[in-house]
Image (tube, rainbow, N blue to C red):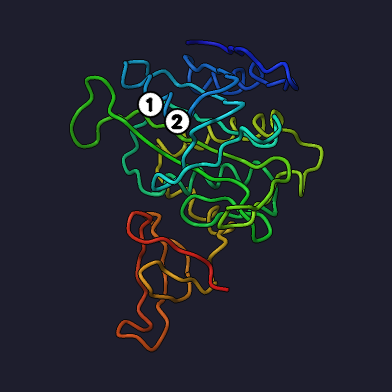
Amino acid sequence: MTGPQAAGLSSLRPLRWPAEEIWQAVSPLWPDFGVEILPEIDSSNSELLRRARAGRTEPTLLVAELQTAGRGRQGKPWQSQRDRRLGDALSFSLGLPLQPADWSGLSLAVGVAVAEALHPAVRIKWPNDVWLDGRKLAGILIETCGMPDANGPGAERYTVIGIGINVLPREADGLSTPPACVQDVLPGLDAPAVLGRVVPALARALRDFGAHGFDGFMPRFAALDLLDGREVNLSDGRHGRACGVSAGGALRVRLAEGGPDGGQVVEVTSADISVRPAG
């Protein structure tokens, strides 16, 4: 679908989504770009992947006012918004064909785009979370599927970037990390305004990543790296001090002295081990 479309906005507390403005900002990058606003869906990521597998692979921004089965990394459920007020959180997915020379560091590049678009106090917790003042503000989930008639190593893939951002304060019940929200630092911003800030920046970042990979994002990520220089605990029982990321986006950790590998710098990938700040 080309051009903006807003479908079935809730009458409970209508939000004025900037579909036209976003389409005008992004369509020069992707001429067949489309915008859709849905009142409710299971998961915006799942919907775009379903469409791609059915042959609908145009660049699409899909915004869900309510997600009932959203999910995060490693299949963890993204808390349902059903019991929250409309606009408390922003959930959207951006899908597009992508064929970078190297996929490494994509989640970090996306994090850079989101953090820079929101506020100077926002930081990135490797590999895919956006934090504010020691609390989680937003999460990122990237999923891909094969394109029709595209096979083999290096083939173009339909890439879906799902992002959930807390806009208004929320309860911490059942959450492993206390939540932050955009209005902690930008009290005048509502969910549509956040969308209008983030999506054009994300589109430009994806264009740049597709052309140049993670290289151009490394210094920008370093300036936003929440873990750099901090003690961290790895889920495999090791601990040490984070010391930036590699050119491929792996977290570099200097292991604590005392163990068999004490003092050694290891590179951790998100597929291997999860990481938490110590203390």
Numbered circles on residues, count: 2
Where does the C terminus fall, quadrant-wise?
bottom right
Q: Is residue 168 left or right of residue 199?
A: right
Residue 36, percent from left and from top: 55, 17
Q: Which amino acid does label 2 sit on?
A: Asn
Residue 218, percent from left and from top: 48, 54
Of 192 and 219, which appears nearest the observer? Answer: 192
From this viewpoint, which residue is outermost toward the bottom? 258
Which residue is found at the position 38% from the left and 75% from the top?
238
Q: In this view, does 205 lie to the left or right of 55?
A: right
* Secondary element at tag 2: helix
- Residue 111 versus residue 152 in the image, above or below: below
**Do tag 1 and tag 2 residues touch (Cβ < 8 Å)?**
yes
Which residue is found at the position 53% from the left and 57% from the top?
125
Residue located beneath label 2 in the image? 45
Find residue 166 and report its image quarter. top right
Residue 219, percent from left and from top: 52, 55
Which residue is found at the position 54% from the left and 19% from the top?
28
Q: In this view, does 162 lie to the left or right of 86?
A: left
Of 117 and 207, which appears nearest the observer? Answer: 117
From this viewpoint, which residue is outermost toward the left? 152
Find residue 45 and report its image quarter. top left
- Residue 115 versus residue 278 in the image, above or below: above
Q: Which amino acid does label 1 sit on?
A: Leu
Residue 195, percent from left and from top: 64, 31
* Secondary element at tag 1: helix
- Residue 70 versus residue 116 in the image, above or below: above
Of 236 and 94, which appears nearest the observer? Answer: 236
Local packing at callout 1 (Cα closer than 10 Å; few below 14, some 14-19, many 20+) is: many
Residue located beneath label 1 in the image? 49
